[in-house]
Image (cartoon, rainbow, N blue to C red):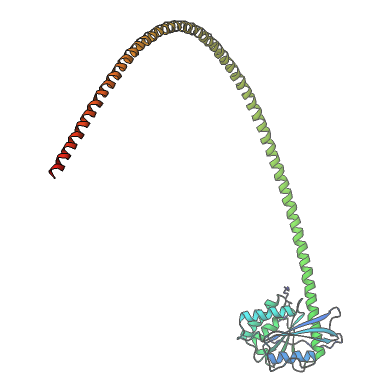
Amino acid sequence: MYLCFSFLVKVTDDVKPRQRRSSLDLLPPNMSELRLVLLGNNWSERSSVANFILEENVFSSQREPDNCEKVRGKLKKEFVLINTPNLLHSNTSDMQMREHVEHCACLSKPGPHVFLLVLDSEDFTEEHRLRLCTVLEILGDQSFARSLILISGKNYRSQIPLKDIIRKCSYRYLMMENLEMEELLTRLRQTQTQVEIIMKEKEEENLRREHKDMTRKITELKGENERERKLRANEQTEKDKCINKEREERKRQREEDEKRWKKQKETLREECRKKVETSEKKAHLEREQREAAERKLEQCRKEIKKSQDAWDKEKKELWEQRHQDLKQHLEVEKTRSIKLHEEFYRRRKTWISSCFILTSLSLSLLFYIFHLREQKL
């Protein structure tokens, strides 16, 4: 973005054009190429100016383009001319205007040297002024300082919007009537030279301001460092006092802890001694009780063993007696069982004989009955 500077000039109600000068050095010697951007409120006049600079009919005054057009030419040195569509017309929306301006900025990279404002004094309105200011502000803050106005028409002194634009451009303007190429290129060189002078002065001013700011910052930094050093010294002093106070407090606390620990140690040792004596007495008493219990337990074991032996002997005798009784009972039962078997076999034999006799009698009777029946038949 360009930096914007304004010249201190005397403003009067009647805007006077600058005197025409002739020069053989049409372009600055250190300029590799001159980049020009045409802006205005009338396409036919812009195309006429462009063709005039190019010295050939490149742009048609009848057909207005939809986008910016870039053309290269040569007048002792190369130059680039960028012609724009009608950006000041109310039919062009703000978005379209910004798109055209961005396209123009891309075509003129790294940046235009001069903006040629081709303005028709008869048709330049307040709306055109506002839109032109917007376009130049978008192109850069230094756009007015880089602008040269070409005016068509005679009644420009009565046009307040046009006079305002002339004032913002530091009264750099030419009348298109009887305009000569040398005069135009001389004014372009002067505009470029003024821009370079302004940029150099602004750079020097920025350097002076930066140096002043740097000196002020260094002074502030020194003061801040001194304040910080004093603050750190005070903090260190306070810190040392706190450390010493803490050390003394810790030393006193440690001495108190040692005294308390010694007292607790003596108390604990006395308690341990008493507990040991009590434990020894208790252990001696428990040992005596355990020995008495062991003696009593041994006596009980002997008595139990004696009782067990007597019981075993009595039980053995009882089992032998029961064994004899059981043996005798078995002998009796065996004799009785033999007798019962003999009685059973005897009775069974008798029953079988009876059954045989009864069966024989039954068969004889049946045979007899059957025989009698046959005789009757």
**In the foreground, 237 or 71:** 71
Is 307 left, or right, of 23 in this rendering? left
Residue 335 lies in what quarter of the image? Answer: top left
Q: Position of residue 210 (x, y in %)?
A: 76, 63
Residue 218 seen: yes
Residue 144 seen: no
When the figure is inspected, residue 270 is found, relative to residue 194, above or below; the finding is above
Q: Position of residue 201 (x, y in %)?
A: 79, 72
Q: Position of residue 188 (x, y in %)?
A: 79, 84
Rendered-image quadrant of the C terminus: top left
Is 339 left, or right, of 288 in this rendering? left
When the figure is inspected, residue 7 is found, relative to residue 176, above or below; the finding is above
The residue furthest front is 375
When the figure is inspected, residue 76 is found, relative to residue 267, above or below; the finding is below
Residue 97 lies in what quarter of the image? Answer: bottom right
**In the foreground, 69 or 48:** 69
The residue furthest left is 376
When the figure is inspected, residue 74 is found, relative to residue 337, above or below; the finding is below
**In the foreground, 18 or 123:** 123
**In the foreground, 348 or 8:** 348
Count of marks overlaid on the render? 0
Rendered-image quadrant of the N terminus: bottom right
Q: Position of residue 211 (x, y in %)?
A: 78, 62
